[in-house]
Image: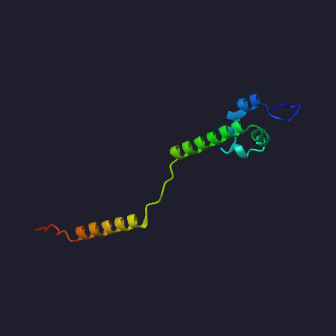
Amino acid sequence: MTQNTGKMTFAEFEERLPEFFTTGTGQISDDPRLQAFLKEHPDSAALVRDLESIAAAAKELLEPEIDEPSDDVWRNIQQGLRIESASTDDTPKAQTD
């Protein structure tokens, strides 16, 4: 950032944008260091929102949410095990002489 005025220039924003994404939470539009700059530069604010959306979508693709199987799935598994267990219990045993 520029030391004299405390305001970030467009060149500084452009240079530091990757750093903001790597050191932040992925929501750099909430970063207090950027609030004044983004308010004064709506095109840059739109770019940041687009990049945040892309980052969020990429994260979802790379880390898919794992849903637990439904109760119906567990009931079907239990029923299948009971049927399998019952069928093996009814199997005639080999006779030994």
Q: Is residue 25 visible?
A: no
Residue 77 x/y as whole percent:
35, 64
The number of numbered badges drawn on the structure is 0
Q: Quadrant of residue 25?
A: top right
Residue 40 visible in the shown view:
yes
In the image: residue 3, left or right of residue 38: right
User: Where, quadrant-wise, is the C terminus in this rendering?
Assistant: bottom left
Q: Give coordinates of residue 46: x percent, y percent.
A: 67, 40
Residue 27 spot, x, y in % from top left: 67, 45
Location of residue 54 in the rendering, given as x and y in whole percent from the top left corner? 58, 41
When asked about the image quadrant of residue 20, the answer is top right
What residue appears at the point 74 percent right and 33 percent down from the top-left corner? 13
The answer to whether residue 60 is above or below residue 14 is below
Q: Residue at coordinates 26% horizontally, 71% vertically from top-left?
A: 86
* Residue lying furthest left: 97
Which of 48 and 18 lies nearest the eye of the viewer? 48
Left or right: 54 with respect to 89? right
**Image quarter of the N terminus:** top right
Of the pair 34 and 21, the residue shown nearer to us = 34
Q: Is residue 80 left or right of residue 22?
A: left
Q: Residue furthest right?
A: 4
